[in-house]
Amino acid sequence: MAADPLKLERDRFVAFAFASADILIELDDDGTILFVDGATLGLLGKKPSDLQNMPFRQLVHKDSIDQLDNIFQGLKRMYRVEQIELSLKKKDDSPLNIRLSGFKMNGLNDHTYFCISIPRANVASQEDVFRRDLYSGLLKKESFVEDANKKIKEAQKEGKEAQLTLLDFPTLKELLDQLPADQATQLLAEISEYLKSKSLDGDTAGVIDDGAYSFVHDGSVTEEQIVQDLLAITKKADPKGQGISPNAKSLDTDTSRLTEQDSANALLYTLNKFANESGEDFNIEALSESYSEMLEDTVEKIAHFKDTVEFTKFEIAYQPIVDIKTGVVHHYECLVRLNDSQQFDNPFHFISFGEQAGLIGEFDLAMTQKTLDILEVAAK
């Protein structure tokens, strides 16, 4: 079935707008929000569906109301405003400094279109946008690992309990596909809000993969409670009223014997393994039971990986890439050959581990430097 050309055009322009904005808003001639999308949950603490049919001025901080009135007056005369700085309200009513560009479309019901972006001067807020999943407002995997590791270490130093729980919804995608887009968005938002509300500091929760989540919490939150609460949330959204009972398992977070960096790398490797294996055939119980053993193995591999990189315990093989028409060598690929394969069966496993443990950048630099050194000698 051919795609609707009007829908394709609309999606294309929305994509262009998001290239320079964090939130898109359409207002009617009374200033009421008709359409909104973007990082509203992460920035304003409200889901896009919460903002539908709300007067836009209710999102504006009290210190910027007069400025907003001037903007609306200006749109009546000029039909465009660009990069105006004002403040919106965060969830706690504190100001969020933003830049607003607007355009009023004559002949299109006199609707106003706003693009909202975080100014570069507001580094913390801008970084926060890139650290979070656009639709759920939860931390992305790498950002979650960073924050979770810090929270766990802080709790250990203070003698407090901190647990890391993995969640897998094996049939969540099937349920979402059955729902209208707005209801699917609403369900994801409710799951996200629940995880944040139960996590340490209300924000140590992350998206690991489609249908896979993780969060750090204290001992008052039990696996049974998590499963029951999330089943109730999904049952409410399920047209069949069945809901989804997620797989949930808390892991031992005692990493006091590890450095903070090694602990973070081991956690990232574990979550990558969880994401890669989650699904209908995934056994979360088996992962949790083998976590301690896997953690020890991971620490050994991290040490071996770093030793290989630091002391360049590898050689480079040059694979010629030949033009099949002329037989002339076009260029060479540089392939790694390990001197010591004690921890890794072959270079592929070495590279894969480095990627999953967040260490591959160190190896890339070492590989590049060794190649440059060889070329320098060859050129003399």
Image: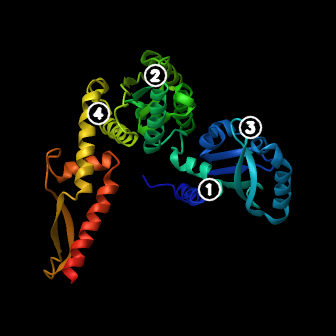
Answer with left or right where residue 159 lies relative to residue 88: left
Lower sequence index among marks 3 and 2:
3
- Residue drawn at x 51%, y 46% is 131
Mark 1 and mark 2 in contact (Cβ < 8 Å)? no
Lower sequence index among marks 4 and 2:
2
Instruction: Indicate the amino acid at tag 2.
Output: Glu
Residue hosting label 4: 295
**Of marks 1 and 3, the one in the foreground:** 3
Mark number displayed over residue 93 = 3
Residue hosting label 1: 21
Lower sequence index among marks 2 and 1:
1
Q: Quick one: SS at disc 1?
A: loop
- The tally of labels here is 4
Q: Between 64 and 366, which is closer to the camera in this rendering?
A: 366
Local crowd at mark 4 within 10 Å, few (<14), some, or many (≥20)? some
Residue hosting label 2: 161
Marks 3 and 2 sit apart, C-alpha to C-alpha, by 32 Å
- Residue drawn at x 35%, y 42% is 265
Instruction: Indicate the amino acid at tag 4.
Output: Leu
- Residue drawn at x 60%, y 49% is 124
Question: Residue 178 location in percent, x, y?
Answer: 46, 33
**Of marks 3 and 2, the one in the foreground:** 2
